[in-house]
Image (cartoon, grey):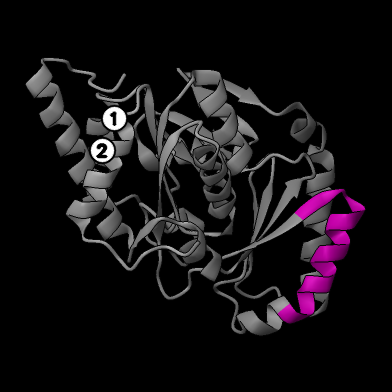
Amino acid sequence: MSAQAPTDIAGIADRAVAVLGHRPAGLFTDIDGTISFMAPRPDEASVVPEARAALSQIERHLAMTGIVTGRALDVALDLVQLPTLSYVGNHGLEWRIDGAHSDNPSALAGRAGLQEALAGIAAAAARLELAEGVLLEDKRLSATVHYRQSPSPERFLEQMLPVLADVARTHDLQLVPGRMIMELRPNTGISKGTALRDIVTQYGLKGVVFSGDDISDVEGFEILRALRDAGTIGALIIGVVGPETPVQVRDTCDVYVANPTEMAAVLTGIGQRLAGAASEHGDGRSQA
């Protein structure tokens, strides 16, 4: 089912708050492309300040408010700067809930292979004279090949894709495409989607709002949709759909906005509505 045409900000916020009325409830969001604009380099990204402020307000009224990202967890913490939120990093391979950090054991065991894979990719890119502008990001439990700044991203992908696929097979890694990136992840079957499913199960959530912009977020969209269709939860899936967004995002979300600024406005609206409801009921955590 495709998403409906873009809804007004107030309308999305209203729908989100209705879903979050199923208690206990949680709101989760991706970072890059969702509450942060895409940057030429990953270390140049920054979260839209209004989104940060809204998440801080929302957290006061929900059982869980969190970040579900492909970023390494420590980097996500530095970007969002809200240490009391829940964090899922590295596409579900590391969690930080209530301040306690846990790593997936299989991903930790595969760390040496991941480093060997990155070394092989770097050597191949140099040999093919394709290394210019390309960044290999070691995220400890996974890795990302960024080719946005390549002089010819299309040529890089065409010539390096067979290399990347071979390296992934050799080291038992998943190769997952994204927005001008290729992800290398341990072959664990873990994703943003499985992480969201596990959170729903472990914490007994009945209402979930999740926003994202890329293929890895679609994994979360599909699992939340399946849980909703089964009657397990109420859910609202918000896509952030821009010129580079994979078509799958628009096809699997419920509603969408055009950019992180609009997403921040939606979050602000959600926070204001939750605060208003809490004031009416005299309850500081109205959805906990």
Residue 89 point in image, percent of width and height: 56, 38
Task: Look at the picture and state if 282 lies above or below 192.
Answer: above
Would you name the residue on which mark 1 appears? 21
Q: Give neighbour class at mark 1: few <14, some 14-19, many 20+ (Cα, 10 Å).
A: some
**Distance Cα–Cα, label 1 vs label 2:** 6 Å
Q: Nearer the viewer, residue 244 or 182?
A: 244
What x and y, as percent, mark residue 4?
36, 64
Task: Evaluate if marks 1 and 2 touch, with contact meaning CB atoms under 8 Å apart.
Answer: yes
The residue drawn where x is 56% and y is 24% is 201
Q: Is residue 250 left or right of residue 117?
A: left
Q: Residue at x 37, y 27 (%)?
A: 25
| Part of the protein shown in magenta | 158-174
Residue 9 is left or right of residue 111, and the answer is: left
* Amino acid type for the residue under numbered disc 2: Val
Amino acid, disc 1: Gly
Estimate the x, y position of residue 54 in percent, counting from the top left.
23, 40
Residue pictured at 37% horizontal, 40% vertical: 80
Residue 90 seen from this side = no
Helix, strand or loop for the magenta stretch, by majority: helix
| Residue 129, horizontal then vertical, whole percent | 75, 80
Secondary element type, mark 1: loop
Whether residue 110 is visible to the viewer of this picture, yes or no, is yes
